[in-house]
Image: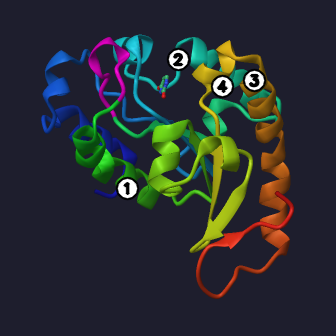
Amino acid sequence: MSTLGELNQEVARCLLCEIAKYRTNTVPGEGAEDAEIMFIGEAPGWHEDQQGRPFVGPAGHYLDQLLASIGLTRRQVFIANVIKCRPPNNRDPLPTEIQNCQKWLDCQIEIIKPRMIATLGRYSMARFFPGKSISKIHGTAVRQDNTIYFAMYHPAAALHQQSLRQAIEADMKKIPAVLAETKSVPEAESGPQQLSMF
Ligand code: URA
């Protein structure tokens, strides 16, 4: 698969999980094909399933505001999810669903080659920071193989909890400095590199 358009068509035909039966639309993700930052959430909700677009409900409107706080619009970044179909009643994604869907996310990362992957919430964090706790690592950046991984709370959780809201807003504002730091600090020769400032 060489383009996002081709990938989106394949995702639309995917029947690997039971939940494919219940979807209105697949929600592969959207944004700039050459985005510097890729945000990865959990799974589509009702609004996303209806429209086939990621983060278009209340959590999405909040994500738009967070992006605006660092001078970005959703068109300048890429927004995806760990799984591409809505779990019924917005239940948590199952391990088999995450596994089945992993190839689509891997292809998206391969095509976009973002400088930074920002994880939104626990499911996305678990993929890139296995075994870590979000309350400990949110707002911290690790660089490995020329990609920066940055963990954030999920905007839906932050919307309803004041302490998380302050944290996600502060974490979002660190992103420009993290990107700037990594332009000036050479990459470690091997292994993950915790970025010093964060
Ligand atoms: N929550 C997510 O994790 N993803 C969406 O696309 C919408 C809400």
Q: For residue 70, what is the image quadrant?
A: top right
Q: Residues within 10 Å of mark 2 (few under 14, many from 20)?
A: many
Which circle's residue, 3 or 4, is located before the other in the chain? Answer: 4
What number is the disc on residue 43?
Answer: none
Secondary structure under tag 1 reads helix
> Mark 2 touching mark 3, by CB under 8 A?
no
Q: Tag 4: Cα neighbours inside 10 Å, few (<14), some, or many (≥20)?
A: many
**Magenta highlight on residue 33:** no
Question: Label 3 sits on what residue type?
Answer: Arg
Numbered tag placed on residue 106 in the rendering: 1
Which residue range is magenta in the image?
84-92
| Residue situated in front as seen by the camera: 66 or 90 | 90
Q: Is residue 54 left or right of residue 149?
A: left
Q: Callout 1, which amino acid?
A: Asp
Task: Please give the name of the residue rendered at 28% of the width and 56% of the height, measured from the top-left corner.
Answer: 1
Spatial CA span between label 1 and label 3: 29 Å
Sequence-first tag of 2 and 3: 2
Residue position marked by numbered label 4 in the rendering: 63
Inspect the magenta stretch and tell me whether residue 86 lies in it.
yes
Q: Which circle, 1 or 3, is nearer the viewer? A: 3
Residue 94 position within the rendered picture, expressed as x and y whole percent measured from the top left: 28, 35
| Residue annotated with mark 2 | 56
Foreground pick, 141 / 180 = 141
Is there a contact, CB below 8 Å, between mark 1 and mark 4?
no
Q: Amino acid at mark 4?
A: Leu
